[in-house]
Amino acid sequence: MPQAAAEQPAATAEPATDTTAAEPVTLKVGYVPVLAGAPIFIAQDKGYFADEGLTIELQSFRSGALIISPLASGQLDVGFGEIGPAIYNAVAQGLDVRAVATASSQPAGFGSVPLLVRTDLFDSGEVTTTAALRGRKVAVNLERSIAEYLLAEALAQAGLTVDDVTLVSLPFPDMPAAFANAAIDAAILPHPLAAQAIGAGHARVLLAGDVMAENSQLAIISFGPRLLKPDSADIATRFLTAYVKGIRDIAGGDWQGDENVAIISKYTNVPAPAVRGSVPSYFDPNGAINNDSVVRSQAYFLNRGYLEYQSPLPVDKVVAVTYLEQALARIGRAK
């Protein structure tokens, strides 16, 4: 069962390794400016990466799918983004890219990526169910993405597919303004941007994220060729050690504390009140990826013809757990 946001995870062991003399390393990290990136933002600004001898250079992207290509080519060392066609195809092509840790999922009570509808459409009664989205303009940050998968799961509950709506590809940060300008009718929009659109009175929740699909794995941390090399195992472990510390700060009851909210607001460019009013993401306190969701989303992308192969990849070809296990050996597992 997922841990409630008000509970602070307790580790079963203290760090066993002194990293004060660790070799200084600079890592380039791609990210999407949404709440799911909070552990990276927290670890950066609270000095957890610095404690591990790591200097992190952050680069913002409109979609996690767009991170995979520069990650595979070595332009980035780490990516925070979705688990979707880009990484599946990269792995199938034999490229050195692997998912290594969670970066948010949606079990019950953690619907952090809802399906929103314009307030005027909802209040008028025109669109109060997913069935009423037929023929409507629905925004996702990128087609052939995890956002499209979530939309497809929502529409399927009403007997529809994504072919029954007009998909609009729009960066997440542009969606609140698109709602305000009536440029879109609905959208898959993560918090805190969802809270911003709702708080401004321009959007309503049509379907909460945790009821669109069963415990969907939304985002992941991925490593590229540099950190996947055997001689970089120590650096990879140090990165995930700091990252898991960031997860545990967010998993605790103080995730909406002033310091955390200010950090999240800084990296998402969303005002603090909207951050504080957001539905929290769920971060497994041990960084584990929900493999069952990986299987389901890959099946969707296969069925849609988005993948460059015909048979599903085994999860262990996409997800590498060794580095996370090494980090947990250092800092202890959360109960």
Image: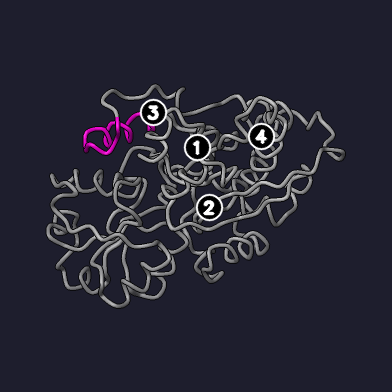
Note whether 167 is above or below 87 in the view shown: below
Find numbered disc 1 in the image and state the secondary structure of the residue it sits on.
loop
Q: Earlier in the sequence, mark 2 or mark 1?
A: 1
Mark 4 or mark 1: which comes first in sequence?
1
In front of the other: label 3 or label 4? Answer: 3
Instruction: Report whether residue 104 is seen.
Output: yes
Q: Nearer the viewer, residue 290 or 252?
A: 290
Of labels 2 and 3, earlier in sequence is 2
Residue at left 42%, top 53%? Answer: 63
Q: Is residue 296 magenta?
A: yes
User: For numbered disc 3, what is the local secondary structure?
Assistant: helix
Residue at the spot of label 4: 236
Residue 92 is tagged as 3
Please provide the residue range marked out in magenta. 292-308
Residue lying at 74% horizontally and 43% vertically, measured from the top left? 25
User: In the image, which is nearer the foreground, mark 1 or mark 3?
Assistant: 3
Give the quarter of the figure containing the C terminus. top right
User: How far apart in space, not on screen, are marks 1 and 3 (Cα)?
Assistant: 31 Å
N-term-proximal mark, 1 vs 3: 1
Numbered disc 2: secondary structure: strand
Instruction: Residue at the far bottom: name it.
Output: 181
Residue 258 rendering spot, x and y as whole percentages:
66, 64
Q: What residue sits right under mark 2 in the picture?
A: 31
Q: How would you rate the neighbour count of disc 2 (Cα within 10 Å): few for under 14, some for 14-19, many for 20 or more?
A: many
Which residue type does callout 4 highlight? Ala
Label 4 – label 1 distance at C-alpha:
26 Å
Q: Nearer the viewer, mark 4 or mark 1?
A: 4
> What is the number of callouts on the image?
4
